[in-house]
Image (spheres, rainbow, N blue to C red):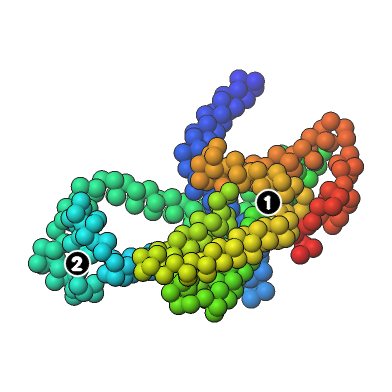
C-alpha cells in the first residue's frame, strides 16, 4: 500500500513539475489573464440580471474590456502615423532622416497615402527600399508577431474559462480544507484580489475622465498653436498609463507637451511656451498628483496597505519584467492575506485582534475600503 502511494505521489510530483514549468514559461499571459478575470468578474455576475447564458456573459464582459482597449491602441497608432506624416510634410525632417535612411525619405515623399496611391507607388518601385528593409527584418517581425498573437490567445482563453469555471476551481481547492483555515484564507484572498485588481480598473477609468476634462479645458483657453492634439484620446491613454509604476501618466502628458512645443519652437514663437508650461503644471497636479493621493486609497482594496501596494507596483516590473506590474500585487495580496488569516490561526492567534470587524472580515483601523467609495 505504501509503495502504491509512493508511486502515485511521484507521478503527481512529475505532472505538477511539468505544469509548473509550462506556467512559468507563460507566466506573463497567465498573470494578465488573472488580472482581467478579477477586473471583469463583477461585471460577469451583474449580467445575470439579463438572464444571459454564462458563455454569452463571459464574451460580453471580455468584449467590454478588450475591444475598447484594442481599438484605442489601433486608433492611437493610426493617428501617430498621420501626425508624423503631417509633421514631415510641414518641416524639413525628411531630408535629414532620408539622407541616412533612403526608405524613410522615399516613404515621406509618398504623395498619396491612399490604397490606390500605395499601389501606384509599389508599381513604380518607390516602396522597394521599404520592402527590402522589411524583408531583412522578416524573421524578427515574424517572431515578435507570432509571440504576441500566442500570448493574446492565452490571455483570452484563460480569462474566458476562469469566468466560466472559476467557482469550480475554487470549490476544488476547498476540498483540501483543514479546520476551516483553508476556506477562510481562500475566500479572504479571493475577495481582496478582486478589490485590488478591480480597483485598478476603476482607477484607470477615473483618471481617464479627469484627464479628458483637464485636456479639453486647457484647449479652450490655449491658442490653437499649442493645443493638445486629440484630448479625448490623450486622456484615455493617460488613464491606461496610470497602471505603469513610477513613470505612470508622465509617459503620456510629457510627450504631449513636447509634441505641442516643437512646432512653436521651430516657428520661433517662444512666448507660447508659457501655455505649454501651464499644461504641464495642470497635468502633473490635477491629473497625476491629486488623484493619486485622493483616489488610490479608495481603490487599494479592503485590507491591503496602500504603501505596500505602491511598492509592489514599483518593484514588480523591476524584478519580474513588465508582467510584474500585475504579478507583484497578486503575490503581495496572497502573502498578506496568509499572514493575517492562516498563519495567525496556525500559530494559535486571533486574526480579529488585527483590526475592527466588518462585513468583509478584519479591517485595519483607519484603512479605507473600496466599498466605502
Q: In which quadrant is the N terminus drawn?
A: top right
Up-down relation of residue 370 to residue 151 (above or below):
below
Q: Relative to residue 168, is residue 180 drawn left or right?
A: right
Q: Residue at x 72, y 60 (%)?
A: 294
Percent position (x, y) of residue 214? Answer: 59, 71
Q: How many marks?
A: 2
Q: Quadrant of the C terminus?
A: bottom right
Q: Which mark is residue 109?
A: 2
* Image-based side of 84 in relation to 311, left or right: left
Find numbered disc 2 in the image and state the secondary structure of the residue it sits on. loop
Dot 2 alpha-carbon crowd within 10 angstroms: few under 14, some 14 to 19, many 20 or more = some
Residue drawn where x is 55% and y is 33% of the image: 16
Give whichever of 45, 86 is nearer the camera.
86
Q: Quadrant of residue 354?
A: top right
Name the residue: 50% across, 56% down: 251
Q: Position of residue 216 (x, y in %)?
A: 55, 75
Corner quadrant of residue 52: bottom right
User: Disc 1 vs disc 2: Cβ atoms closer than 8 Å?
Assistant: no
Q: Give the CA distance from mark 1 to mark 2.
A: 52 Å
**Image spot of residue 83 (x, y percent):** 35, 68
Residue 247 located left or right of residue 263: right
Secondary structure category for the residue under label 1: helix
What is the x, y in percent for residue 122? Answer: 14, 66
* Quadrant housing residue 84: bottom left
Q: Which mark is residue 193?
A: 1
- Is there any visible trace of residue 366 in the rendered image? yes
Residue 43 in view here: no
Amino acid at each position: 500500500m505504501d509503495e502504491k502511494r509512493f508511486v502515485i505521489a511521484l507521478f503527481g510530483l512529475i505532472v505538477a513539475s511539468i505544469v509548473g514549468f509550462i506556467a512559468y514559461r507563460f507566466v506573463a499571459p497567465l498573470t494578465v489573464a488573472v488580472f482581467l478575470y478579477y477586473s471583469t468578474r463583477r461585471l460577469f455576475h451583474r449580467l445575470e440580471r439579463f438572464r444571459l447564458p454564462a458563455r454569452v456573459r463571459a464574451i460580453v464582459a471580455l468584449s467590454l474590456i478588450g475591444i475598447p482597449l484594442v481599438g484605442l491602441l489601433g486608433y492611437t497608432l493610426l493617428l501617430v502615423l498621420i501626425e508624423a506624416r503631417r509633421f514631415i510634410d510641414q518641416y524639413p525632417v525628411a531630408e535629414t532622416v532620408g539622407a541616412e535612411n533612403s526608405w524613410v525619405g522615399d516613404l515621406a515623399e509618398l504623395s498619396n497615402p491612399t490604397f490606390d496611391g500605395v499601389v501606384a507607388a509599389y508599381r513604380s518601385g518607390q516602396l522597394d527600399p521599404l520592402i527590402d528593409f522589411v524583408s531583412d527584418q522578416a524573421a524578427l517581425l515574424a517572431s515578435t508577431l507570432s509571440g504576441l498573437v500566442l500570448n493574446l490567445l492565452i490571455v483570452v482563453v484563460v480569462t474566458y474559462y476562469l469566468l466560466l469555471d472559476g467557482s469550480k476551481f475554487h470549490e476544488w481547492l476547498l476540498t483540501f480544507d483543514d479546520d476551516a483555515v483553508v476556506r477562510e484564507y481562500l475566500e479572504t484572498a479571493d475577495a481582496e484580489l478582486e478589490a485590488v485588481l478591480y480597483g485598478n480598473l476603476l482607477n484607470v477609468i477615473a483618471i481617464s475622465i479627469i484627464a479628458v476634462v483637464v485636456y479639453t479645458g486647457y484647449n479652450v483657453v490655449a491658442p490653437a498653436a499649442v493645443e493638445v492634439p486629440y484630448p479625448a484620446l490623450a486622456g484615455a491613454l493617460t488613464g491606461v498609463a496610470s497602471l505603469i509604476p513610477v513613470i505612470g501618466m508622465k509617459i503620456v502628458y510629457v510627450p504631449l507637451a513636447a509634441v505641442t512645443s516643437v512646432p512653436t519652437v521651430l516657428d520661433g514663437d517662444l512666448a507660447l511656451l508659457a501655455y505649454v508650461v501651464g499644461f504641464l503644471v495642470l497635468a502633473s497636479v490635477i491629473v497625476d498628483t491629486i488623484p493619486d493621493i485622493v483616489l488610490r486609497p479608495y481603490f487599494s482594496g479592503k485590507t491591503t496597505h496602500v504603501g505596500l501596494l505602491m511598492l509592489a507596483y514599483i518593484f514588480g516590473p523591476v524584478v519580474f519584467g513588465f508582467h510584474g506590474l500585475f504579478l507583484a500585487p497578486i503575490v503581495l495580496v496572497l502573502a498578506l492575506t496568509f499572514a493575517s488569516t492562516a498563519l495567525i490561526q496556525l500559530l494559535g492567534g486571533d486574526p480579529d485582534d488585527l483590526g475592527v470587524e466588518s462585513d468583509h472580515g478584519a479591517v485595519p483601523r483607519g484603512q479605507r475600503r473600496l466599498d466605502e467609495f
